[in-house]
Amino acid sequence: MRLCLVEDMGAGGLEPLTLTRPVHELLLGASSLGSKLERAFGIGPGPNRRACLIRPHLSNVVRERDPHRVVNDRDWMARGPVIVANSRWVPPSGFEPLIGPGAWVGRCEGQPAFAVVGPEDAVGLEPTGVDDWFDRVAARYTGNDVGGEWITRPWDLVSRNGAYLTRDFKEAGGPSVSNRHLTAMALVGPSNRLRIHETAKIDPYTVLDTTNGPIVLGANAWVQSFTRIEGPCAIGAETQLFRANLRGSVTIGPNCRIGGEVEAAIVHGFSNKYHEGFLGHAYVGQWVNLGAITSNSDLRNDYGEVSVPLRGDPIPTGQTKVGCFIGDHTRTGMGSLLNTGTSVGVMCNLLPAGLLLPKHIPSFTAVMYGRVAPGFSIERLFETAEVVMGRRGQTFSEAERQLYSSLYDQTRLERERAFHREKERHADEWAIPSRGASRG
């Protein structure tokens, strides 16, 4: 059987993380949402079995990142039966699709999660019409409730990350840990909750604590002395930990440089938090640099519910522990302080002001003196991206240039609204009362 991952209108609710990637590339636990769906349906690698239907402005960069996946190809859809799965749906543990002859629909909480259809139905799919397509298919074919859960907002990924780290560890299996690694570290907790790649390097005077969950270290990961890692935790290939304190429910992608304190957070890959500072209950995108002593709050002083401004409008999270969500290629200056429930777009520059920075920072803007302001020109931002990626042996490609140019236009209105709000707030702060004012 073949599998096509699709995005519905809910992809917009996962911004700023989905501005630069399809939903199926988001991380949850030790793997992406797409990988979880492929494993659940028993789909192996290769273009004959894997496809996706995504927002058109992402298509070229996804082809570059995953050349063995078919992207937005109607001819591929017409070649035979296919499973069409919503990328926001996470299958339950032990899921067995039991796919037989004929079309049918799997539902989660009453909504279509996936559909098994023939080519006559599959060719009707369009990137902007996934919701309507599922409604039509669900009305025509029978189905069952298959369980699982939906990912609706960015904080869903963070709050559920620890549970999925434990689940992914159990489902992955494989070799555990060598005696060579055990002699280099201080282990607290059972050793069968460790999975360390043979090429990983662990310096002396490191502590790995598996009491509350498993720990996974990828190929060529390097754990420097005086680092403490508490499970559940997954560290990607080539990532380096510099005297870090990872306090559980943490996923670090590949090629990151991480130091300081990190708790209940996801860092997507190729990002730096090299120095001291706190990162908690957060999701950080790719190619992000958090300057020294950058810290975020993840708990209000009154312990109340946190709201997060998505596209500038506050959205209640229903949670009390919510940190920040940072888009790709964003940088913070030394000593930046991020408020509880902060949303930062892509290619932003945040400069410290001694105070908590604004909670809503649109893409391609800067924060100067504590206020949202126009950022660098897009060409200068591209030049910086070329330098940053070149230092890791990567290239800022023409497809990425086109993506960010498109996003610059798409997010223009959000920036203009933010600038207008800043202007109004500034006017209120400096307003001179016409009556009752003291004359000194």
Image (spheres, rainbow, N blue to C red):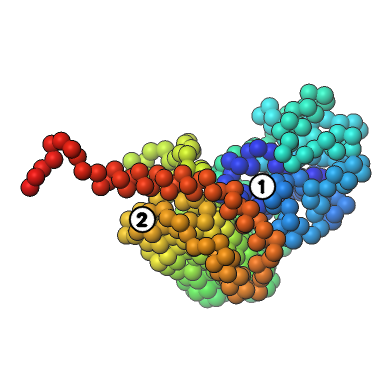
Q: Is residue 98 above or below residue 426?
A: above
Going by the image, does 270 lie left or right of 99? left
Residue 40 - label: none
Q: Nearer the viewer, residue 48 or 181?
A: 48
Dot placed on the residue nearer the N-terminal end, 1 or 2: 1
Does residue 366 appear anywhere in the picture?
A: yes
Residue 308: x %, y % from top left: 47, 43
Q: Nearer the viewer, residue 37 or 92?
A: 37
| The N terminus - image quarter | top right
Q: Which residue is mark 2?
A: 370
Q: Residues within 10 Å of mark 2 (few under 14, many from 20)?
A: some
Q: Is residue 421 above or below residue 356?
A: above
Please, which residue is most extreme toward the front here? 434
Q: Residues within 10 Å of mark 1 (few under 14, many from 20)?
A: many
Q: Considering the numbered disc 1 on the image, is that residue within a helix, a strand or a loop?
A: helix
Q: Considering the numbered disc 2 on the image, is that residue within a helix, a strand or a loop?
A: loop
Residue 23 - label: 1
Going by the image, does 303 lie left or right of 115? left
As measured in the structure, the alpha-carbon distance from the residue carrying label 1 to the one carrying label 2 is 32 Å
Identity, as a three-letter code, of the amino acid under mark 2? Gly
User: Which residue shows up at 61% across the image and 42% down it?
Assistant: 12
Residue 199: x %, y % from top left: 68, 73
Q: Is residue 138 above or below residue 264?
A: above
Residue 206: x %, y % from top left: 51, 70
On the image, which quarter does residue 183 sit in? bottom right
Identity, as a three-letter code, of the amino acid under mark 1? Val
